[in-house]
Image (cartoon, rainbow, N blue to C red):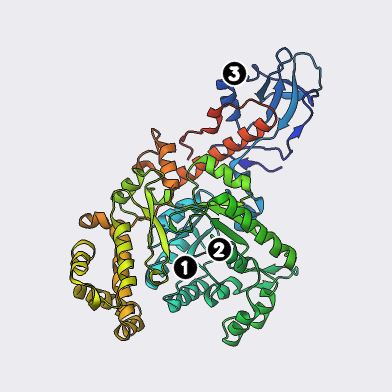
Amino acid sequence: MRPRATFDKVVDVSCSSPTRVEQDGCVGGWRGEGVPAFAADDLVVAIREIRERGFVVVDPDSGRFGIATGGSLLESGSPGTWPVTAVLPAMYPEWLGDRSFNEAHGTRFPYITGAMANGIATTRLVVEVARAGCIGFFGAAGLSLDLVSAAIDELVEELGDSRDPWGCNLIHSPQEPALEEAVADLYIARGVRRVSAAAYMALTPAIVRYAYHGIHVDAQGAVQRPNMVFAKISRPEVARHFVHPAPARMLGSLVAQGRLTEEEARLAASLPVAEDVTVESDSGGHTDNRPLGPLFTAVQAVRDAAVAEHGYLRPIRLGAAGGIGTPQAAAAAFALGASYILTGTINEACVESGLSMEGKHMLAAADVADVTMAPAADMFELGVDLQVLKRGTMFAPRARKLYQLYQSYPSLDEIPGPERDELEQKILGMSIAACWEATREFWNERDPGQVAEAERNPRHKMALTFRSYLGLSSRWSIQGVSDRRLDYQIWCGPAMGAFNAWTAGSFLAEPEHRTVAQVAMNLLEGAAVVTRAHQLRTYGVPVPPAAFSYRPRRLV
């Protein structure tokens, strides 16, 4: 067995599986330095020795179960030994998920940081995550093609094309399909090998073309797909689109347009669109607020049915996202069957994120209930909401007011005086006319067709004007514009509050000390400790509650 790295040293590890016998039997006797742990405090210490084999021992006099670490397993009844009823191998954070994930993507840990839009997931964040042995996705959504291209330059320079795994996000843009296509084209041209597909409600030609571009059969007869899609979904019906092959009609259309070859389309007919599907529960940003347990189980059933139907030779891995801000939550996700976990909001509060320091301190003050839903800028007309920070900002009620006006009136000109005054003075901070002029200037540079449509359609003009506030509010929070602090749009899920409670009083309590690598390593280390505690509890050890409360410590 090859050595495997821990956080601070290299050790040789065993691949053996846990063994258990009936309580009145034993698998051998333990002998080592010191005595086994039976008292509550000693049990907690022993449980945290996850990189040592654990022996479940029995006190012959009292019948109590305890834990021994180190030492040796000898034959039952050997002089000076403690009866052993179970032996657990070492537990490593690297082993928490599906090992095919690490093998497929070249990672050390089954851990991903999400692609927070508008560059909040910065290139610096992605680099630090990749160097820690995880995968980071750059937050390309909302940025111009030039900025995304420049970010790819930085990532290739720092990480190479494949030396350390990284990716960018490709967000579904129903209001700007041409932009979605252009971003996908850029990723294909620049050799971006991983994308996080976000906010999709159905497949689009852009994501399908990216998923299957370049697939081929190698010299050994195996199908290789250079591009890897991580589909982030929160509904079983959306998951179905990604775990099945793309529709034949869409593949045929892409071939007819010269955007896929006939060979690529032929091979695509037997491959799912995505082999990694991230099940997103109650999270920051776009979310359906669903609890992870029921949602993950439902998507598992969809995945399993697709595998049975198509007979895929490679696994479709399910990841878990949303609500993961503590080691207990991470351990619970892995226990559900997650191949990997993805964190979002907690990274937004780290030093490497693109959010302003003022915004990071606002996140650091959040509790689990300090979140709410508000209209999303990119899907405003569709009535889609996203989850944002409530504490310290008025963005959510002001954004909801905009959507109420959009629903109530056919055009900007029809908004009555009192409503207009509130809109201009308390929300837009300028006249409606001035706001439209700034909005028109923005869209003339980004997509002149939007301006032409607005001049024909008063409803579209109103939507673009209101969307300008929604879009700017996130940029104000990134730039730290102090006089618009009450309008900060900060994407935030309840995991932030749980993370703050977990790190209170530790070196991770202040945003200035929160790094994405420290956060990731502490979550994974803690999840391994919690998992070990659960294992020992099933073997009869009276695990103290404190064993499930791992505290942060400096690991990198």
Viewer-nearest residue: 380 or 9: 380
- Which residue is depicted at the point 63% across and 35% down? 534
Find residue 39 and name its label. 3
Find residue 231 and name its label. 2
**Please, what is the three-letter code of the amino acid marked with disc 2?**
Ala
**Please, what is the three-letter code of the amino acid marked with disc 1?**
Ile
The residue indicated by pointer 1 is 171
Q: Quadrant of the N terminus?
A: top right
Distance from label 3 to label 2 (Cα)?
47 Å
**Please, what is the three-letter code of the amino acid marked with disc 3?**
Ala
Q: Secondary structure at mark 2?
A: strand
Viewer-nearest residue: 496 or 347: 496
Find residue 413 and name its label. none
- Which residue is depicted at the point 63% across and 19% down? 38
Q: Is residue 369 above or below residue 549?
A: below
3 or 2: tag closer to the N-terminus: 3
- Which residue is depicted at the point 47% across and 40% down? 556
Crowding at dot 1, Cα within 10 Å, few <14 / some 14-19 / many 20+, comes out as: many
